[in-house]
Amino acid sequence: MSALSSAIEWPEGRRFAFTVFDDPDAQNFATTRLVYSFLADLGLRTTIAAWPLGVSREANSGGETCANPEYRAFLQQLQGTGFEIAFHNAAPHANPRAETIEALDRFEEYFGQNPSSMANHYNEEAIYWGSARLSGWRRKMYNVITRGRNEGRFFGDVEGHRAFWGDICRERIRYCRNFVFSDINTLRMCPWMPYSDPHRPFVRYWFSASEGDMAPRFLQTMRDRNQDRLEEEGGASIMYTHFGHGYVQEGKLNPEFRRVMERMARKNGWFVPASTLLDFLMRTRGATELSDSQRTSLESHWLREKVFRGTS
């Protein structure tokens, strides 16, 4: 894909933009406090997704929820210092429509507004997820690659299903994460973001991210030469990760994580949460409504990376 980021004039004379979108899977309160205190001290402001409701049935993932008042208070503190709190579905298990609505109401109560952004958890109410991320022959190919295990599992966009909440998503949430690429320069891989997709109308705008699902992949993407290239290209990086996976060892930060983030923070980057970055792109360039050719390009490139690189 061609890079469209070179002409962007980032705010405050910054040379590029960088942020992290962190999903809460496997993340306990001690890890959250350690990682985010470190990021705050560096002057980085990023996005952490949350589950507003506590666990009420068998969970499919560990991780803190906003049912823990101490954890919730810490998220509110983070929000007050410039971090973004996002939505990761209602709770770490399947949730029917009524519970998703309750979760969004709780989110608004806790954080004073609807979530600006979200990322799907692998619940049945995930929206346009699994094979529904793709169209036409790409969807068929994806089902062959995954042996059909992600076909017919997710129903957030399926009207009439008990988990449907697509209309609520469109009404209350602005941005939803979709494709993840191995390149640190997210904007290079998805030059149209934020974009709308007329084939997936229950999401207002989509954005992409750069691969870093767990510490090893994050550190690979954040290698020194990749950081330097991001700066040289004047690009934008939205790193996807789970800070609950490999970033804290025996109560201490992974030393390589500490090093690469300190190095990044010394650069002349614009370090803002994901929605702030996407709002800026929207204001300065507008949003793209994907054409058929753009959709084919984006989906095909992600599918190739899924096959050969195992991206998320």
Image (cartoon, grey):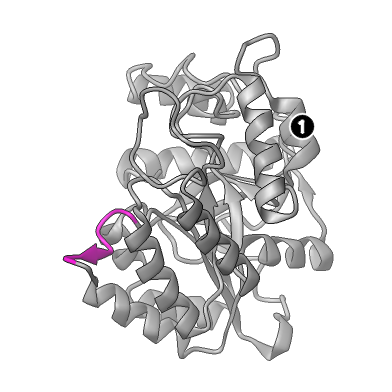
- Look at the image and tell me whether residue 106 can be seen: yes
In which quadrant will I find the C terminus?
top left
| Residue pointed to by mark 1 | 198
Name the foreground residue: 130 vs 228: 130
Q: Could you tell me which residue is drawn at 50 percent across and 52 percent down?
A: 69
Judge whether 284 appears above or below 305 on screen.
below
* Residue 100 highlighted magenta (yes or no): no
In this picture, which residue range is highlighted in magenta?
244-250
Instruction: Indicate the position of residue 165 as horizontal and vertical percent values.
Output: 68, 24
Q: Residue furthest left?
A: 250
Name the foreground residue: 82 vs 223: 82
Helix, strand or loop at mark 1: loop
10 Å crowding of disc 1: few (<14), some (14-19), many (20+): few
Q: Could you tell me which residue is drawn at 70 percent across and 80 percent down?
A: 10
Instruction: Indicate the position of residue 23 as horizontal and vertical percent values.
Output: 45, 50
Name the foreground residue: 73 vs 183: 73
What amino acid does circle 1 point to? Pro
Q: Quarter-wise, where is residue 143 in the image?
A: top left
* Residue 247 highlighted magenta (yes or no): yes
Q: Main secondary structure of the magenta part?
A: loop
In which quadrant will I find the N terminus?
bottom right
Instruction: Indicate the position of residue 223 as horizontal and vertical percent values.
Output: 32, 74
